[in-house]
Amino acid sequence: PSSGGVWSELCAAEGPVLHDVQAGNDQALPAWLGEVGIEVIFPLRTPDRFLGILGLSPPRGRSLFSSSDIGLLENVAASLALAVSHALTLGDLRSLNLLLEERVEERTAELTHANRRLPEQHADQARVEEELRIAKEQAEAAVSSKTRFLAASSHDLLQPVNAAKLLNRGERPLQPLDHRGKARARGRVDQRG
């Protein structure tokens, strides 16, 4: 069928479009409809979309549809449109369900992979923590050793300085010891001795 105004009118039609060859009303529909014997076309629509058309030939032995036939066929067309709409909606729901299932499977696979890596990560973390503990103990031992070394070095360096201070404190300069002074010094050393 050719596109154009006729199909736009069919899509917008609220009720049946009749093709009455006897009354000369065949201008509204494409010529091929008359050739295949279509007398009435019902637009299949829901409130939110146009789904297609239902074209019918007259019943056998009759040349036209009666008004009661048209009323019944309108109800059939409305029911058919609703069924087609539900089928399309069901198809959409199935597609969405498949998409959701794929996403769930992907996410489950990601989580399973992450869960498998957890013990590995835990072991790595425990190893790093142990290395840090050992490094801290070594650093503390080094600081303690440094402190002892500095204390000993300080003592060794200050000892001669303190001795020199003691020697300089005397009010009188040191005199060489005479014979009696030498004997007293020897005696004191022997007593402590």
Image: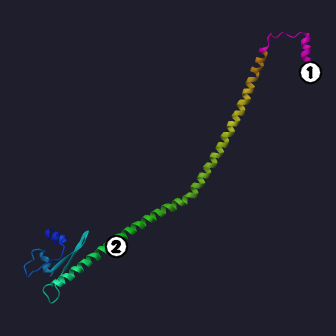
Instruction: Provide residue 155's location: percent of width, then percent of height.
Output: 74, 27
Q: Residue under circle 1?
A: 190
Give the mark nearer the N terminus: 1 vs 2. 2
* Residue 79 in magenta stretch: no
Residue shown at 11% from the left, 74% from the top: 28
Instruction: Provide residue 174's location: percent of width, then percent of height.
Output: 82, 11
What secondary structure prevails in the magenta region? helix
Q: Is residue 76 above or below residue 182?
A: below
Label 2 environment density (alpha carbons within 10 Å; few <14, some 14–19, many ≥20): few
Task: Residue 118: name its quadrant.
Answer: bottom right
Q: Residue under circle 2?
A: 90
* Residue 174 in magenta stretch: yes
| Nearer to us: label 1 or label 2 | 2
Residue shown at 89% from the left, 9% from the top: 178
Q: Evaluate if marks 1 and 2 touch, with contact meaning CB atoms under 8 Å apart.
A: no
Label 1 environment density (alpha carbons within 10 Å; few <14, some 14–19, many ≥20): few
Q: From which residue to which does the magenta span run? A: 168-191
